[in-house]
């Protein structure tokens, strides 16, 4: 289940302008810090860095 939520968050980072906080809340993570930690564990990069890298 957590993997699906993280995959959905990754897609949201790629396709929306929602903030990391808004994405974490929409997917029912405990808070944005918990979400960021789990995202980095799975993808090796923070959500903010991931989105920043999409621009280049």
Image (cartoon, rainbow, N blue to C red):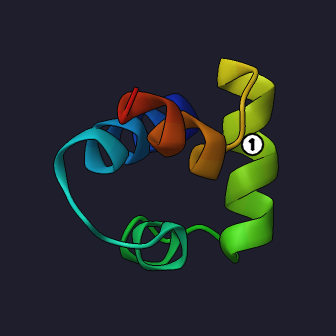
Q: Residues within 10 Å of mark 1 (few under 14, many from 20)?
A: some
Please tell me which residue is depicted at 60% across the width and 51% down the height of the picture. 48
Q: Is residue 34 left or right of residue 4?
A: right
Q: Nearer the viewer, residue 34 or 46?
A: 46
Per the image, label 1 sits on a secondary structure element best described as helix
Q: How many numbered discs, if any?
A: 1
Tell me if residue 32 comes above or below residue 12 in the rendering: below
Q: Is residue 36 left or right of residue 24?
A: right
Please tell me which residue is depicted at 51% across the width and 42% down the height of the picture. 52
Q: How far across and down, in percent of the image, does residue 30 sit?
A: 69, 74
Q: Is residue 10 left or right of residue 30?
A: left
Quickly name the residue at label 1: 38
Please tell me which residue is depicted at 42% across the width and 79% down the height of the picture. 22
Give the quarter of the figure containing the C terminus: top left
Can residue 22 be seen at all in this image of the molecule? yes
Q: How far across and down, in percent of the image, does residue 45 sit?
A: 72, 29
Please tell me which residue is depicted at 67% across the width and 39% down the height of the picture. 39
Among all residues in the image, which is located at the extreme left? 15
């Amino acid at each position: 289940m957590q993997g699906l939520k993280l995959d959905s968050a990754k897609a949201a980072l790629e396709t929306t302008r929602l903030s990391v906080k808004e994405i974490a809340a929409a997917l029912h993570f405990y808070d944005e810090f918990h979400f960021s930690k789990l995202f980095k564990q799975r993808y090796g990069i923070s959500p903010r860095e991931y989105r920043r890298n999409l621009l280049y």
